[in-house]
Amino acid sequence: MVKTDKKNNLTLEDGAQIAVVGGGPSGSFFSYFAMEMASRFGMNINIDIIEAKDFNCSGAAGCNHCGGIVSESLIQLLSAEGIVLPSTVIRQGIESYTLHLEQGHTVITAPFNEQRIAALFRGGGPKGCIQGEVCGFDNYLLKLCESKGAKIIYDRVIDTQRNDDGILIKTKGAEKKYDLVVGAVGLNKKTFELFHEICPDFVTPKTTKTFITEIQMEEEVIAEYFGDSMHVFLLNLPNIKFGALIPKQTYVTLVLLGADIDHKVVSQFLNTKAVRSCFPPDLNLDAAMACQCYPFINIKGAKLAHSNRVVLIGDSSTSKLYKNGIGAAYITAKAAATTAIVHGISESHFNKYFQPACNKLQNDNRLGKFIFAITSIIQKSSILKSAMLRIVIKEQKMKREKRLLSSMLWDTFTGSAPYNSIFYRFLHPRVMASFIWYTIVSLFNKKIA
């Protein structure tokens, strides 16, 4: 049910029907927060979460194409909201990361305990897993929403239609009219076309192609070669901003982030000395890959991702550049739920109360682009990388609060802090002075050699 005032503003009332298209983190977060807020206001709402995948399945059928790391700060934030992740969802805690350069490598420990990260699977695990063996993050959130009263519809949306008194959603199995439709469809281009029918001014996000694969090994082997450390690679390779190897008990997830990564780029990365040294020398990497994909990621947020009765969230709207998509899903989903329940569902409501959250993420991403531009310059320079390695090695012998460059690198690669925090730390006089000094030292040593 919806109420219309004299200014044609729309607000939800008791009995309102809400469709959430997409059952990933953003869709589940929205549903959870909307039901929690409605309960506080004494409002009865009905939410249908429409999801085509079964996240309990292994392989492509339940996969949501994500590296699967969550910062400890986000886990604590979710816990404060009542979303407590069970130990069965978290595959492994990451206590440090090992930074690999052509000039060498060093271990960087978490700056503080609350900045550790957790490794998990989004779906039911890689291809070959027994169904039910892995408790995935997405499935846990979806079941949590179901326990709160949401109805899960495992179906695919095939058509949308705007009417004067609501929006008609057609799936393969049925059709139903809703007062509000929430788009949490990730970067699904076909589904974007359906949303253009009910949100005609929507400009889709800009994307680029990345790479993810799951490498299967014995748990004892992973413990020996990786321990509780995520391995991050800052190598001078085309198209790659950075690569990461994330241990998950019996699998290691390889994530390559950059621009338009293809099979040739992946092969170059896997055959570098730095990468091969992380694995047993007799391991056949190609044979060990349980599954692999080239998913798209959001590198520039959508525009006008809302209209009357419609709002798009998560990757469909705005994400965090090269990192922490789950964190962005949380931010945009909560902002959309607050707007819909507390304020209203008109375009003006979403523009006033939801859009600022997206703008804040997009402004932060602009600084992120600058940071990665600097990172790209460092990647291409052996002198600058040698200087960075020297600084980090020295910092790891200091007290945690004095490891300025180490903490910047940790937050850049793990998503534990916004880019603006990283940017302002980069301008710290001690960081700049150290970089200049060790660049001179590295240049001098190179001339002597």
Image (spheres, rainbow, N blue to C red):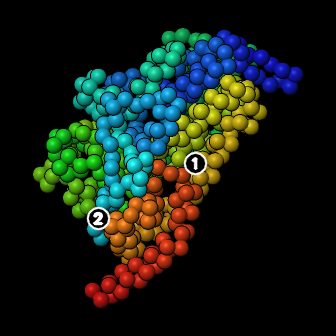
Q: Quadrant of the N terminus?
A: top right
> Looking at the picture, how far across and down is residue 218, in whole percent?
16, 40
Query: Which residue does the image show at 20% across and 46% down from the upper left?
Result: 223
Query: Which residue does the image show at 45% across and 38% down from the upper left?
Result: 75
The residue sitting at the bottom extreme is 448
> Looking at the picture, how far across and down is residue 261, in whole percent?
40, 51
Tell me the tag on residue 105: 2
Query: Which residue does the image show at 40% across and 60% down from the upper left?
Result: 400
As displayed, is residue 65 above or below residue 41?
Answer: below
Q: Residues within 10 Å of mark 2 (few under 14, many from 20)?
A: some
Q: Quadrant of the C terminus?
A: bottom left
As displayed, is residue 333 above or below residue 171?
Answer: below
The residue sitting at the right extreme is 6
Helix, strand or loop at mark 2: strand
Which residue is the site of mark 1?
300
Helix, strand or loop at mark 1: strand
Please state which of residues 241 and 337 is positioned toward the viewer in this rendering.
337
